[in-house]
Image (cartoon, helix red, strand yellow):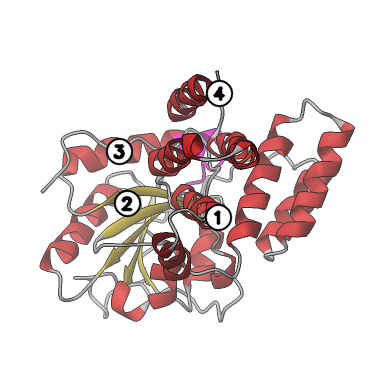
Amino acid sequence: MTNAVPPQLPANLRGAVDLSSLVHRDERRPTDVAPGGDATGSADRLVVATDDQSFGQVLELSRSVPVVVALWASWSEQSAELVQSLERLVRARAGRLMLAAADADRSPQLVQALQAQAVPTVVALVAGQPVPLFQGVQPDDVIDQVFDQLLELAAQHGVTGQVPVDDADGEPAEAEEPAEAPLPPLHQEAFDAISRGDFAAAASAYRTAIAQDPRDDLAVAGLAQANLLGRLQGKTLDEIRNRAAAAPGDLDAQLDVADLDLSGGHVDDAFARLLELFPTLDAAGKDAVRERLLELFQVVGVEDPRVAAARRRLATLLY
């Protein structure tokens, strides 16, 4: 079954899942062959195959050009066909996008990190951060619209590089080098800390930035994301969901599931869970849920329409 309307990408890169566990592996070069490709052909700049071991380099590539990551499986004919469609549509973008295809059965840690619950699952990487796109097979026109949204989002974050492709004369085209403005020192310190998985240090740097400039909205949002990633660090998807299912009245367990849902791009589910829980709690519990919601609003972005709707519902519950 396909969706008639393309999924809406987030307005920013907040709320991304933590991929730091895949960064420091043996970063061997991603192979040059995706499903259906020719292993004897020349190196392909636009379409590569990746796995748990080589994914770190794919993350680095996404700092220059948006990368579409497709999780597929050899036993799923539909997923292999989707990868071929993605390849065709990526190539039509003339180097503005890349495609990295990962066999889900051979990349269990990548599947877990991206919190994929179905094959195929398609996620984008922009500046090292994952952006959920869709699950299941989609028609070409829907994918095309999603790619349009992805390129707009990437441009907002300065990821506007282009992969060199052969021109009409068969000569490699020149790569476009994006001019990136340096981050403020404290933001760079926080970014580096997140990259190495030290979320406490990242939160500390963001708090210092906020103390120096309370109007630093990016630091406020960055602090919320660092706190979210810190809360999820060391916990598994199954552990969080099993605990919440076994103890529906356990506030901490439900807060963890909301964090997990939001980190996987299930923003409405995260908000709905906490808003439905809110009226059943005592005063202390309500304060905890309200504070968590306000933080998650920052992670998603206060301008996001889903945040506006959840904020209205929270106000109704409060007053």
Q: Position of residue 111 (x, y in %)?
A: 38, 69
Q: Earlier in the sequence, mark 2 or mark 4?
A: 2
Callouts 4 and 1 close, C-beta under 8 Å:
no
Q: Residue at x 57, y 78 (%)?
A: 25
Q: Earlier in the sequence, mark 3 or mark 4?
A: 3
- Read off the residue under disc 4: 318
Q: CA distance from mark 3 to mark 1?
A: 21 Å
Q: Position of residue 274 (x, y in %)?
A: 48, 41
Q: Count all numbered tags in the image, as a single digit.
A: 4
Residue stretch in magenta = 153-163
Q: Secondary structure at mark 2?
A: loop
- Read off the residue under disc 3: 7
- Read off the residue under disc 1: 128
- Asked if residue 257 is positioned above or below residue 92 in the image, the reply reads below
Callouts 3 and 4 close, C-beta under 8 Å:
no
Type of amino acid at the residue the image marks with label 2: Asp
Q: Main secondary structure of the magenta part?
A: loop
- Asked if residue 160 is positioned above or below residue 42 in the image, the reply reads above
The numbered dot on residue 169 is 2
Q: Quadrant of residue 70?
A: bottom left
Give the foreground label among 3 and 2: 3
Label 3 crowd (10 A; few <14 / some 14-19 / many >=20): some
Q: Earlier in the sequence, mark 2 or mark 1?
A: 1
Residue 3 or residue 311, whichever sits in front: 311
Single out the residue that lies furthest toward the front.
282
Give the foreground label among 4 and 1: 4
Give the foreground label among 3 and 4: 4
Q: Position of residue 101 (x, y in %)?
A: 32, 66
Q: Is residue 131 magenta?
A: no
Type of amino acid at the residue the image marks with label 4: Leu
Single out the residue that lies furthest toward the right.
212
Q: CA distance from mark 3 to mark 4?
A: 31 Å
